[in-house]
Image (cartoon, helix red, strand yellow):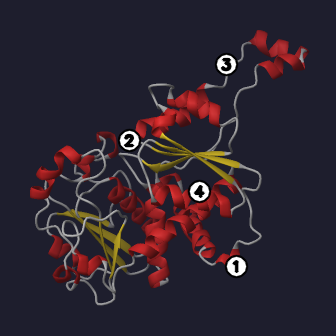
Amino acid sequence: MRHFLEVDDLSPAELEEVIDLGLAFSDEDNFSNNLPLKNKGVALLFEKSSLRTRHSMEMAVAKLGGHPVATTASEIGMGLRESAADIANTLAGYHSAIGARVFSHDTLIEMTEAFENSKPTKTKETQSKEAQSKETQSKEAQTDAVPIINLLSDFSHPMQALADLLTIKQEFASFDGIKIAYIGDANNVAHSLAVAVSLLSKNGKNISIQIACPKGYTFKDNLKDNTIKKDDTIKTDISKITIAHDPSQAVEGANVLYTDVWTSMGQEDEHKKRLKAFKGFSVTEELMAKAKPEAIFLHCLPAHRGEEVEAAVIDGKQSRVFAQAQNRMHSAMGLLSWLFREN
């Protein structure tokens, strides 16, 4: 069973295929008769509230012929009312895929492992009984596995990375020669984007990313230790990934400037501390001017104008944030159609 918990659950070639599918789906004429989810349900679980993720996923499923069913945190009680494993096994009886937006990445892992653990170990006695009785086989049948899709976790945001890459390809037609400057918190969004860049470079694309973040807010500081090497880099092909602490240096020659909020959901009590730490890491008109003239600005939204980005930048002519948001739907369609074909 193919799940999608991080971008590198795809091979480099598969990643490009999914992006190209999303690009094709951005033209509505290309999917009017393409309904790979016809008569299929997709469960969408939200521990964390959402605007873009919920609407983009619901519409992606619907446009592909499926039926999305969204459930919020108050209805789920993940880990309190019911375990993530039990929820996964229950929903797999109704749906053909499960998407989940969660606080902890471990919840997603528990859901994928639930399908492995639900299969009973067959003793010789059981095998003998099965051979004698179809009724016994029926009684021992377990829930079939379905793909689990990470709609966001504390570790990664792979669906966002797909939309980011789709937007970049729409703008520049190719990934070759593209430099991305990511300014701000080296968080889950930055992590998935960096992994995606690494995969594209493995597939022969001349693309790179430079992340400029304050000291104390690198991947090593933000993410789980088992994903990070001792030199503070991702466990992947890192030749195209650079981590530094100078925004001006990072944006030199960049085609894409990207940022995210300094204080994510669940970090509200750190807001004052982060405002101080991230001083000097705002994407301003002055910073944009140091990038290439054709550079575009991306932000996964929601945005805090006056903090991580100036209003003149996010609302200016180089901004592509709303095309990027719309591409959340198109890239989701690409991934879903690919997953249902592969599974």
Under circle 4, the secondary element is: helix
Q: Amino acid at mark 4?
A: Glu
Q: Which residue is denoted by mark 2 in the rendering?
A: 103
Task: Give the percent coordinates (x, y) of residue 67.
Answer: 68, 52
Task: Give the percent coordinates (x, y) of residue 300.
Answer: 37, 64
Compute the Cα span from label 3 to label 4. Answer: 37 Å
Left or right side of 323 for 67: right
Between discs 1 and 3, the one toward the N terminus: 1
Under circle 1, the secondary element is: helix
Q: Which residue is denoted by mark 1 in the rendering?
A: 29
Q: Give the number of the mark in front: 3 or 4.
A: 4
Left or right side of 304 for 20: right
Q: Amino acid at mark 2?
A: Phe
Per the rendering, the mark at residue 121 is: 3
In the rendered structure, are the residues bearing label 1 and label 3 in contact, judged by CB atoms less than 8 Å apart?
Answer: no
Label 1 environment density (alpha carbons within 10 Å; few <14, some 14–19, many ≥20): few
Q: Which image quarter is the N terminus in? A: top right
Task: Give the percent coordinates (x, y) of residue 50.
Answer: 43, 53
Under circle 2, the secondary element is: loop
Residue at image location 43% in from the left, 62% down from the top:
161
Compute the Cα span from label 1 to label 4. Answer: 20 Å
| Residue found farthest to the top | 125
Label 2 environment density (alpha carbons within 10 Å; few <14, some 14–19, many ≥20): some
Under circle 3, the secondary element is: loop
Compared to residue 2, the image places residue 293 above or below, namely: below
Q: Amino acid at mark 1?
A: Asp
Left or right side of 50 for 64: right
Q: Which residue is denoted by mark 4 in the rendering?
A: 58
Compute the Cα span from label 1 to label 2. Answer: 37 Å
Compute the Cα span from label 2 to label 4. Answer: 20 Å
Q: Give the number of the mark in front: 2 or 3.
A: 2
Between discs 2 and 3, the one toward the N terminus: 2
